[in-house]
Amino acid sequence: MTEFFDSLETRSADERAADLARSLPEQIARAKERAPGISAMLADIDPAEVTTPADLAKLPVLRKSELGRAQSEKPPFGGFAAMDVSGFEHVFQSPGPIYEPGRTTHDWWRIGRFLHACGIGKGDIVQNCFSYHMTPAGMIFESGARTVGATVFPAGTGQTELQVRAAADLGVTAYAGTPDYLKIILDKADEMGVDLSRITRAGVGGGALFPSLRQEYADRGITCLQNYATADLGNIAYESPAMEGMIVDEGVIVEIVTPGTGNPVPEGEVGEVVVTTLNPDYPLIRFATGDLSAVLPGISPCGRTNMRIKGWMGRADQTAKIKGMFVRPEQVAAFVARFDEVSRARVVVTRENEKDVMTVQVESTVDAADAYEAAVRETLKLRGIIEVVQPGSLPNDGKVIDDQRKYD
């Protein structure tokens, strides 16, 4: 296996700037021509005048809430895709609901670059434990694994004993999935007396990889690296073996801005991640992720030269990613609206035994924990612990999602 995925990773700053000066205005012009939503948003923008990230800062920011409204008015993509839905091989639904397109063309989401950095390639058998149900994560990582020549076992989530048996029978050498779920599989294998020591590499995403969990994998002989990707944008940034920050993918432009604005912050300051993708099929321009990060000065010791960010540092709003799924304030409001006796609810997120724990505190005059638990599964799409509390007992601080996990 070669050290780098391609020559783009080691470009000089001048080479990368020159390439961007050509590709960025081309992308904006193409988006204005083919995507009505982008055309309306950038009606007064001359693409030829947008050749650098600094020029991008003059453009408006596209927020997920705006994309959702556009999709409800003009389904399924709200005019932000460069072709009709029938031109895509896949269409996905994420919580919101938000609809995303997908393609089977070569490494469409650009995950191959990350998996190559993980040391995954031809001869590996990857147990892909990202979900294949409605959301695109399973297909995103399968596409990347195929790109690097690996064989994929499309495992999805759940049925842990079968996951263990398959990993042993197939001789799985690498894992793809959320950070926590690999531990669940390994612990179950220990309980069953099954040897999974052939798994030596893991590429994870969809949640924070806590240092203690990474060390636990390392103690088992597993090198675990993480990437930062979204259903809308594909790969945004990824770790290399140097494990010093996350290297920005070559197919996107990342800005760090003051949350709620489009104004770039000084290098090193924490702000909201705003991404422009160079994907011609789904050309999102200055798409605000709602995630927090900061630029890490310098270049990676691994030799990859693109900008680095510090990784995922929380959310700019109260939205939280729990067990790989976003939980949003509007989902909590939808839960409360189901019950006349419920005045307020608060989602508390903690960590226990290296796993996310979601507790839903419900202010109610009725002790109906079973009904509330079922409603939480339907509205938040996750199982949670229910705590029924007296009306007026929750803090009056405006929070509906209290993320108490520590990310340092």
Image (tube, rainbow, N blue to C red):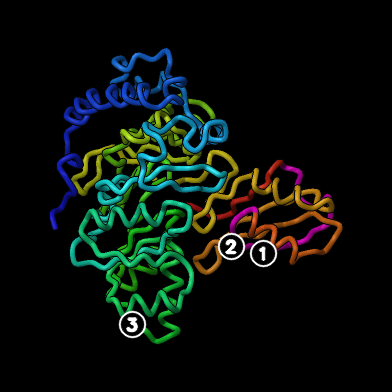
Residue placed at 56% from the left, 49% from the top?
320
User: What residue is disc 3 on?
Assistant: 195
Which residue reaches farthest front? 86
Q: Which mark is residue 132?
A: none
Q: Which mark is residue 385?
A: 1
Q: Where is residue 349 drawn, in percent x and y?
A: 60, 56
Which residue reaches farthest bottom? 193
Of pointers 2 and 3, the one earlier in the residue sequence: 3
Give the residue type at disc 2.
Val
Q: Residues in magenta? A: 379-397
Residue placed at 46% from the left, 20% from the top?
40
Q: Is residue 99 left or right of residue 198?
A: right
Quadrant in which residue 192 is drawn:
bottom left
Quarter of the picture holding the N terminus: bottom left
| Proximity of marks 2 and 1: CB atoms separated by less than 8 Å | yes
Give the main secondary structure of the magenta stretch. loop
Assign a secondary structure to mark 3: loop
Give the residue type at disc 1.
Ile
**In this view of the protein, which residue sits in the foreground, 120 or 348?**
120
Residue placed at 76% from the left, 51% from the top?
338
**In this view of the protein, which residue sits in the foreground, 295 or 340?**
340
**In this view of the protein, which residue sits in the foreground, 22 or 313?**
22
Q: Is residue 36 above or below residue 392?
A: above
The CA distance from mark 2 to mark 1 is: 8 Å
Give the residue type at disc 3.
Asp
Circle 2 packing at 10 Å, graded few (<14), some (14-19), many (20+), is some
Q: Which mark is residue 357?
A: 2
Residue placed at 22% from the left, 39% from the top?
305
